[in-house]
Amino acid sequence: MSHRFGRMPVVASGVLVTVLVAGAAVVVSQQGMAAAPATKISREDAAKSLLAHHYGRFGTQAVTRALAWTAGEKQSPGRTIGEGDLARSSTASGGSTALPRAALTNVRVNDPAADRFQIDQTTQSETTVAVAGSNVAVGYNDSQQALLALTDGIDLTGYSYSSDGGRTFTDGGALSNPLNFVNIGDPWLTSDRAGRMYYATLTYGGNVGNGEVAVARSTDGGQTWAEPRLASPNDDSLFYFADKEAITAGRDPSVASRDNLYVAWDDLVFDFATFTLTTGLPVASSTDGGQTWSLHYLDKITNDLFSCSFTQYLGAQPFGDPADGTLYVAAEKIAVTDPDCTGGQLTLSQVIFRSTDGGSTFGPAVTVSPVTAASPTGALELGPGMFMRTAEVPVLALRAGTLSLAWNDGATGHSHIQLANSTDGGATWTVKPATTGTGDEVMPALSADREGLHLAYYQRNADNTLDTVVADSTDGGDHFTAKAITSQPFPGVRTVPQFDPQIAFGYMGDYIANVSDGNHQYFAWGDNRNRITNFTHPQGRNDPDVYFARR
């Protein structure tokens, strides 16, 4: 099995990492496994081993970057890409059928004039939306407020806001950093019934350089945000890294008038005292609007720091049933059997957990479906050097008592969207294709309201351009009618080598946004339609911006 694009270790396969343990050298590599030492190791050494054996393959850009910093790397992660992996990346074959356009106004959310600090650090992508009446906030990764190496003040978590329902936006810059931390992106927004908005982000630092989850609150429609508060452990005695968080607001199961906050993520924890490595799926809940948090684990798996066999989660997705406050958390489960560190066997699945007491306890995991990687290397090739990494993280929606879960899946040889439905609270599931054909669809985002189920995604066209699409169903996903949200298709951008020095190779965002407030649907996505010219690109290049549409 080849490494998956965008989930590769910073230390390339075959490069040895020397871990110094109590004056002795323990050598670990991708080709072999060292016995675990009986004495303590440093944080830097733990990070190097994790990158070589574990999270270098399946971590997102944010956590891989943070691990690289802890391991002593100074530049952005993902610099080494095997030529064989590039050759096997998925290219267009036949292409998707041209779709009618929904005739929606596309509004650029970010202000390109704000990209003025560092040359070519102009990436805005990976979007999230919160809505409260006429107020709309859009969050996204933003590479502008950063230097090449880790410095105080770096901040990759950006936002924009609108007070007119999304007709116009003001670029708000970067979310403030928590004290003694720096925000490293993976944005996720939600709003409660009182109109407050909440912004979850990954953040790095503290006293020892851990990766945590923080949540900020806005009471003025997303114009300003309080300093983010940590929802994750922030325990200096642990080596701790959180990844791929998402947040939702939902009614309390006992107090119907109160909204709780739930933020879920996957993590890896190395306990220096017990020499134990665990990967887990935690959920933090708050009953006081994000002022304080209570942490619970849905699952925690013991792994070997010095083995290439491991199991972890990715892409936790919390969702609350507004009728009774039941909380669901879905995630992709990743299991690698690789005792000889030669690639091994990869097993993927979608799983879901259920809580009826506000996230304090959860029932056992239910396997929704096995999963096939969207692409053999996790990347679509949109042109020379234009690679777009993909993952199979799940998204959830609920309509008329039917819980729906969607992800992109490569079982047919192309990346298509699979839809699973449950009518018994997640106990059993039926799976059907939501998209088919000879093209590719990636990064699904799901919402539901009285008008139906709304599935947004990127569609790769026959000419390797992209459109953002919404497909609507009124019969639980048996039939969909699809239209392009984008007013025009857009090309990829150069990601190998990456034009933006802050951004990992192969990165063009990991998700898009699609929410409904019951009256309108709101969409936000990364879009490369605009071009800029500078001294590094005198002939011009396409530029990643964030666009929005309301329907």
Image (tube, helix red, strand yellow):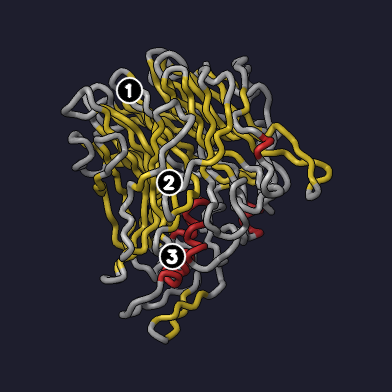
Q: Please, what secondary structure does the residue beneath circle 3 have?
A: helix
Q: Residues within 10 Å of mark 3 (few under 14, many from 20)?
A: many
Mark sitting earlier along the chain (1/3): 3
Q: Residues within 10 Å of mark 2 (few under 14, many from 20)?
A: many
The numbered mark at residue 50 is 3
Mark 2 or mark 1, whichever is nearer to me: 1
Left or right, 314 with respect to 7, comes to: left
Mark sitting earlier along the chain (2/1): 1
The numbered mark at residue 244 is 2
Kindly identify the residue that appears in the image at 50 percent across and 35 percent down: 139
Left or right, 150 with respect to 402, comes to: right
Q: Please provide percent x and percent y for residue 57.
A: 49, 57
Q: Please provide percent x and percent y for residue 219.
A: 39, 28
Front-most of 184 and 402? 184
Give, as a three-letter code, the residue at label 3: Leu
Kindly identify the residue that appears in the image at 79 percent across and 44 percent down: 534
Q: What distance separates the C-alpha of mark 3 from that of mark 2?
A: 17 Å
Kindly identify the residue that appears in the image at 44 percent across and 28 percent down: 130
The numbered mark at residue 193 is 1
Determine contact: label 1, label 3, CB under 8 Å: no
Q: What distance separates the C-alpha of mark 1 from that of mark 3?
A: 41 Å
Position of residue 3 relative to residue 488, above or below, is: below
Kindly identify the residue that appears in the image at 62 percent across and 61 percent down: 80
| Residue 166 position by quadrant | top right
Give, as a three-letter code, the residue at label 1: Arg
Q: Report whether residue 438 is seen.
A: no
Q: Report whether residue 181 is seen.
A: yes
Q: What distance separates the C-alpha of mark 2 from that of mark 1?
A: 25 Å
